[in-house]
Image (cartoon, helix red, strand yellow):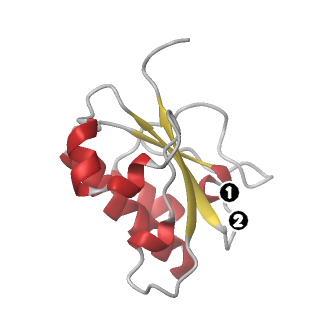
Amino acid sequence: MAIPSFDTNGHLPAGIHLATWQEVEETLAFNPRRQELLSGLKRACESLKEVGCLRIFISGSFATNKEFPGDFDVCWADENVDLEKLAEIDPVLLGRQEGLKVLCGKDYSKKKKDKILCKTVQCSSKRT
């Protein structure tokens, strides 16, 4: 299923759009800055996949056609995630607050001096 086209304001239509990683790259990584951000997100996703995460949700300005977004906002589904293993292999994805997962994109950057920021929030499968 392809990601829909951006509207005249540069936004995707409201809703959840299922996509392969290749489709995400083709749609959202259309310049070097976005490729760099997506590279960091891919490294985080590899850790999440290793611990059982089946789905992430990308939003914020990165999910628009803004040429130079400052960061990416990502939410990840936790229903199959081994949180203990995640704490061992990539504790930065667990953040510091209960229920809040914070990812600083520079931790996934090749260059430590890069200022790639990200806000990652865990999407709980439990309804409150």
The residue positioned farthest toward the top in the image shown = 128
**Type of the residue with mark 2:** Lys
Q: Which residue is mark 2?
A: 66
Asked whether the residues under the numbered discs 2 and 1 touch, taking CB atoms below 8 Å apart as contact, a structural biologist would say yes
Q: Residue at x 51, y 12 (%)?
A: 127
- Which of 45/122 is in front? 122
Q: Earlier in the sequence, mark 2 or mark 1?
A: 1
Q: Which residue is mark 1?
A: 61
The residue positioned farthest toward the right in the image shown = 9
User: Taking the image as drawn, is residue 120 in sight?
Assistant: yes
* Local SS, label 2: loop
Q: Is 32 situated above or below 2?
A: below
Q: Is 110 situated above or below 71?
A: below
Q: Residue at x 26, y 54 (%)?
A: 47
Of the 4 image quadrants, the one containing the N terminus is top left
Q: Left or right: 78 with respect to 88? A: right
- Which of 34/89 is in front? 89
**Type of the residue with mark 1:** Ser
The x and y percentages for residue 22 are: 34, 58
* Local SS, label 1: helix
- Which of 33/83 is in front? 83
